[in-house]
Amino acid sequence: MSQVKTLPITATRWLSLLLCAITAATVTVFLSKVGFVQKAYSSWSAILNANPILHYSCAFLAGIGIKLLLDKFYISHAERGIGFSWRYPPVTMSLWLSVTIIGAILYFTSNQEELIAATSCFEYFIVLILGSSIITAYQQSNERISLNLVVCFSLIAATSTAFIYWHISQIGFSWPLFITVDVYIFSAIFLIIKYINECIKAKWNRNQITLERTTNLSSGDFKTLDQFKSWFKDDSTIKSTEGLEPDLQVYAKRITERLQNGGDKDEKDLAQHIALCGPYGCGKSSIVESIVNGLAKKPEKESIWIHSDISTWGAASGSVAHVVLSHIIDDISQYIDMCAFRALPKHYTEALKSGGSIFQFASTLLAGPVDIEGSFQKLNDVLDATNHKLLITLQDVDRGTGDENEKRLNDIAALLDRLKDKNLSNINFIVAMGNEKSLYIEVQSKLADHIETIVSEDFKKALCEWAKLCTEEVFENDMLLTHSSISSSEQYFNQNPLTFRQTFYQPAIISNNFIVSIRVLKRVMRRVSK
């Protein structure tokens, strides 16, 4: 049997938005002719028109509620750009198509007076948009002012200004509408000035960082005790490849190149499933963060990378695939309209089922079965249409104890193994995990096509250098015992020239056998320093 051909994702998207617009316009026009709807609207309008402030307040609050609802259903996002994509238009296009269709119907079926009456409520629509804009600005209040927000306020201010002139010429002057438009104009001017100021500051800070940047040192190159202390007190994740230890830079560069090329030289544009293995604290998270930031520095013609970092620690073994998928959709929604993928989370539907027969029926209608592989395939088509690539990093997959941890790890391995055969060229995985147990080694072949194992480092040089610097501090601070015959560190080193050599210093040799990673080394140094 021949496989049924499906419409391309672009055609499917436009067709669905057009059908939504036609349906919404048809329902709106039909309801406007129904007697009881007209009566209910007249009664509600009479209540609101009794006090204009009440009318405008309701419109403003409705704008806030609509914006929060759009965010909840992945239709809008505070950090998403306003760029329009013909290949995958946002679902808000159905709104503008609906307004266009309704406007055409009004224009061809009504006289001028009825048209003015029909558009007289547009001033309340502007106040409604003001509520949505203010809640958007509040969502970004703790972040930098984005170009998205500046352009939105500027466009709304320009459109509102044009409308108020039309409103005055046709209907008359309106103080609330005039004040609302002034708020937009002043907000747009304020945001433009603040955005320009932040851009100037950011450029100045980048120049300062460039001037102050010094050669990267590894833990074995420190020459003073203060350098050691500042190094082992900082246990944060490193954000750039240049900031990694030289041995770890090799892994970051190799994985980044593999992701950018879509595989080896003879493998182009293939999905990458990579396992990054090593003991706890060896730098896996720093390597992942460096890779993500490296991919963000892309040439203009290359795809935009979206990063979804997922911790599966504590996830129930039977719902790992749903947890991964829901996190991915949340992260992609910052870049692309994801309302087509909106579904009730599995724990919601399970709660509904436990409520009785009526709730079980409702959960069946609201959720239904979720085809995980099909959802990933659809996601891949959307990413391809919008020129995006997705990097999913699964961390803490080996955290936990008991059978539940093994089941969860096997579920992740089974999911990735099934996705290998789906030709998902725009969806890539990096799984950060340990390799000290036989179970981890067994599932690596299912998890990944390419395995990077972080080699254990030799910390004897760093331990010896640190011990030598600590010894110098002992002499400098007069922390010697009273019966000591040695008065200076130089005298001590001359009498014991081989003490701090890597092959002779027993504390370093013994400690090196138990220190398996940089994080463990830093932890030991912090404890000893106290």
Image (spheres, helix red, strand yellow):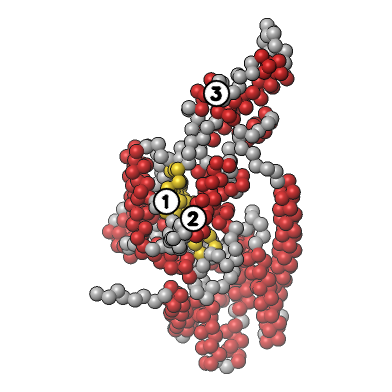
Q: Are marks 2 and 1 in contact (CB under 8 Å)?
A: yes
Q: Residues within 10 Å of mark 2 (few under 14, many from 20)?
A: many
Q: Which residue is mark 2?
A: 258
In this rendering, position of residue 25 left or right of residue 196: left
In percent of the image, x 47 and y 66: which residue is there?
383
User: Residue 380: which quarter of the image?
Assistant: bottom left
Look at label 3 and name its amino acid: Thr
Name which residue type carries label 1: His
The residue indicated by pointer 3 is 503
Instruction: Give the farthest residue toward the left.
Output: 1
Query: Which is nearer the N-term, disc 2 or disc 1?
Result: 2
Which mark is first along the chain, 3 or 2? 2
Task: State the mark number for residue 117.
Answer: none
At label 3, counting other C-alpha atoms closer than 10 Å, the crowd grade (few under 14, some 14-19, many 20 or more) is few
Please identify, in this view, whether the residue under mark 2 or under mark 3 is nearer the observer: 3
* As drawn, 448 above or below 503: below
